[in-house]
Image: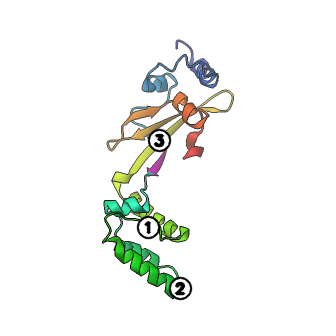
């Protein structure tokens, strides 16, 4: 790309939008540098937007993995106002969870499951093993749209896994302003 920056951006935008993909073979970080994306190897907060993504397992998986105990299920569900009959059923079923090899929670209502999902989310958000930090930078184009780059940030702050506008177009259907999809 032996063009001035505005021409490089326009050529890249046209290439992505028309799906010609002429420049797709350029490595991700080289493409970012060609479009003058600041610090694509180590994104910084002055230029990039950061978001934390939390991966949460199902209630059953959280029980099987030990992320959530039967006791915590009982404590979480105890916070709700329950009829005596429902409390009795839940107490018995929750008590049986530790005894079962396969942790099934089909007895939960959607509201009870949502309560437990929130509990699991809170535990995962506090745990580094369930979190991913994403960084986003959008190159503004003459059309007013944008060409976005999204990177997964490693523990040392580096960005090895960088998605280009081509990747984001293929994933989200549009190459710019991916923050809306987070």
Q: How crowded is mark 1: few (under 14 residues within 10 Å), some or many (20 or more)?
A: some
Q: Please tell me whether mark 3 sits on a helix, a strand or a loop.
A: strand
Q: Please tell me whether mark 1 sits on a helix, a strand or a loop.
A: loop
Nearest to viewer (mark 1 / mark 3): 1
Mark 1 and mark 3 in contact? Answer it, CB < 8 Å.
no
Mark 3 and mark 2 in contact? Answer it, CB < 8 Å.
no
Nearest to viewer (mark 3 / mark 2): 2
Image quadrant where residue 147 sits: top right
| Residue pointed to by mark 3 | 135
Cα gap from disc 3 to disc 2, whole angstroms: 47 Å
Query: Could one spot residue 39 in this view of the protein?
Result: no
Q: In this view, does 28 lie to the left or right of 71?
A: right
Q: Upstream in the sequence, badge 1 or badge 3?
A: 1
Q: Please tell me whether mark 2 sits on a helix, a strand or a loop.
A: loop
Q: In this view, does 66 lie above or below 153?
A: below
Q: Position of residue 11 (x, y in %)?
A: 60, 18
The one nearer the camera, 161 or 144, is 161
Q: Residue at x 60, y 38 (%)?
A: 177
Q: Upstream in the sequence, badge 3 or badge 2?
A: 2
Q: Is the magenta stretch mostly helix, strand or loop?
A: strand
Q: Residue at x 55, y 35 (%)?
A: 171
Cα gap from disc 1 to disc 3, whole angstroms: 36 Å
| Residue pointed to by mark 1 | 105
Q: Residues within 10 Å of mark 3 (few under 14, many from 20)?
A: many
Q: Residue 83 has which mark?
A: 2
Q: Residue at x 60, y 34 (%)?
A: 176
Q: How crowded is mark 2: few (under 14 residues within 10 Å), some or many (20 or more)?
A: few
Boundaries of the magenta span: 46-53
The total of numbered circles placed on residues is: 3
Q: Outermost residue toward the bottom?
A: 84
Q: Upstream in the sequence, badge 2 or badge 1?
A: 2
């Amino acid at each position: 790309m032996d063009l001035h920056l505005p021409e490089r951006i326009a050529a890249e935008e046209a290439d992505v939008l028309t799906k010609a993909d002429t420049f797709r073979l350029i490595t991700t970080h080289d493409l970012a540098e060609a479009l003058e994306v600041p610090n694509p190897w180590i994104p910084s907060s002055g230029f990039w937007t950061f978001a934390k993504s939390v991966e949460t397992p199902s209630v059953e998986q959280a029980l099987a993995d030990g992320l959530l105990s039967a006791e915590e299920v009982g404590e979480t569900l105890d916070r709700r106002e329950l009829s005596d009959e429902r409390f009795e059923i839940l107490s018995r079923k929750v008590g049986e969870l530790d005894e079962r090899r396969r942790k099934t929670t089909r007895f939960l209502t959607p509201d009870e499951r949502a309560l437990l999902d929130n509990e699991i989310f809170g535990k995962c958000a506090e745990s580094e093993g369930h979190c991913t930090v994403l960084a986003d930078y959008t190159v503004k184009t003459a059309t007013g749209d944008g060409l976005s780059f999204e990177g997964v940030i490693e523990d040392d702050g580096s960005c090895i896994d960088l998605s280009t506008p081509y990747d984001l177009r293929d994933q989200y259907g549009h190459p710019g302003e991916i923050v809306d999809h987070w």
